[in-house]
Amino acid sequence: MAGRLLQLLALWTIVVGVVQCCPELCSCQDKFAHQFADCAYKDLLVVPLGLPSNVTTVSLSANKIKILKSKSFINITQVTSLWLAHNEIVTIETDTLAALVQLRNLDISYNKIVNFPWQDLLNLTALQLLKMNNNEMLNLPKDAFSTLKDLRSLRINNNKFTTIVQGTFNALTSMSHLQIFNNPFTCSCSLEWLRDWILTTKISVPEPNVVSCEAPEHLKGTMVTLIPKLDCKAPTVKISYEPNMENTELYEGSMVILNCEALGSPTPQVSWEVTAGNQNNLFPLPSSGEANDVPINDKTTNNRFLIFRNGSLIIPRMSKKEDGNYSCSAVNDLGKAESGVKLAMTGTPKSAAIQRWTRSVHL
Ligand SMILES: *[C@@H]1O[C@H](CO)[C@@H](O)[C@H](O)[C@H]1NC(C)=O
Ligand SMILES: *[C@@H]1O[C@H](CO)[C@@H](O)[C@H](O)[C@H]1NC(C)=O
Ligand SMILES: *[C@@H]1O[C@H](CO)[C@@H](O)[C@H](O)[C@H]1NC(C)=O
Ligand SMILES: *[C@@H]1O[C@H](CO)[C@@H](O)[C@H](O)[C@H]1NC(C)=O
Ligand SMILES: *[C@@H]1O[C@H](CO)[C@@H](O)[C@H](O)[C@H]1NC(C)=O
């Protein structure tokens, strides 16, 4: 009786095993200790449910999938090859790929991906081949590939990347092939490293004649390897003040002038940031335009302080309300520099104290 029950149980297990074997429309087979699920060319709109849990290769190429949901692959974490090229994928939800820690080959080329969940890639440390070409991606974070030590081949060509941050490929110690062509690169100071890197790296970077500049206008069509040496200087800022408060007492009602002098190439974008009276305001200086003698902030701050496009900030009458931080920043392709003063009225006698501070970040 018990034996018969066991037999039935065994039979049931086999039947269930067969039933859950393969989604409709896909064909699954076991070969050389690998389990393949072939679901290519089936007009699928979503990743099918019920892929075998021990599947190692899944082809979903040439379907009509538009979105990869975060639960799509939770049952098939043994997958080593995932083929998703030639779909209509726009969105890949965060965590969809992070669980596939065995993945060696991932092809998501020829889709419509704009935002890729880059943090998921950090988990895919076994990746050897990554094809992301022919999508619409704009932003490539600097640490995107920082954990992919086994990656041999990377294709990010035919996307909308305007720049690649220096250091992006530094961790890729196994890489031999890198396709970056047909991206609309802005050939400014922050991309100049790529010219020197392509010319010296041992990694093959094919199609150099279409690894080229889209902007600025005068470099349009120029190969990245032929970008002329650019004049690049990280920004600096210096604040000077009148009166010279290190020597002079500053009293309630005195006028204070803070001059911000910013240097750098390309010409940095300069802003004053004022934190006073529980308010924080940012005032970007316009780079050109009307006359200098009209303050750029006349309406918003009740004339407590006036900012001019030449970089001067004038506090016509110092009082307790003007206590705060006055900082000037300058930003260009190469980094950001910031310098500020902290003004504080010091009770009696009604004089003010000033403290200076500076910091800078190079990209
Ligand atoms: C995968 O599972 C099926 C049954 O569920 C089994 O027949 C097959 O041998 C397994 N394949 C591998 C590669 O482990
Ligand atoms: C994963 O497995 C569970 C339990 O077998 C099932 O209910 C679920 O539909 C599966 N999910 C996918 C995406 O295959
Ligand atoms: C990332 O990988 C680790 C194992 O290396 C795993 O524990 C973790 O769950 C993965 N992350 C996600 C979101 O699946
Ligand atoms: C900037 O312009 C203002 C208003 O015209 C003027 O008072 C100030 O002295 C100028 N600053 C410098 C550094 O020339
Ligand atoms: C002013 O700047 C200093 C230096 O960065 C900072 O420690 C302080 O918190 C700032 N104060 C305000 C009111 O923002």
Image: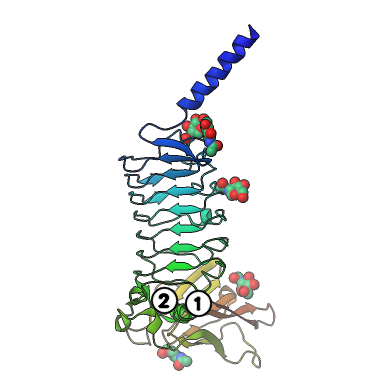
Label 1 element class: loop
Circle on res. 297: 2
Q: What element carries label 2?
A: loop
Q: Which residue is drawn at 30% across and 84% down?
A: 218
Q: Can residue 255 be seen in this view?
A: no
Instruction: Decide which of 240, 24 is in the foreground and name it.
Output: 24
Would residue 327 appear left or right of 229 to someone viewing this image?
Answer: right
As drawn, the residue found furthest toward the front would be 32
Q: Earlier in the sequence, mark 1 or mark 2?
A: 1
Is residue 39 in view from this perspective? yes
Q: Mark 1 points at which residue?
A: 201
The amino acid type found where label 2 is placed reads Asn
- Hey, what amino acid is under mark 1? Thr
Are the residues at dot 1 and dot 2 in contact (C-beta closer than 8 Å)? no
Which quadrant of the structure image shows residue 139?
bottom left
Query: Residue at horizontal 53%, vertical 18%?
Result: 12
**Of tags 1 and 2, which is closer to the observer?**
1
Which of the pair 304/72 is nearer the observer? 72
Residue found at the very far right of the displayed protein: 348
Drawn side of residue 310 relative to residue 274, left or right: left
Q: Position of residue 68 (x, y in %)?
A: 42, 45
Q: Residue 267: where, in percent of width, then height?
A: 43, 85
Residue 27 in the image: above or below residue 6: below
Residue depicted at x 58% and y 61%:
147
> Residue 170 location, x and y as percent?
55, 70
Q: What is the C-alpha distance between the residues marked 1 and 2?
A: 50 Å
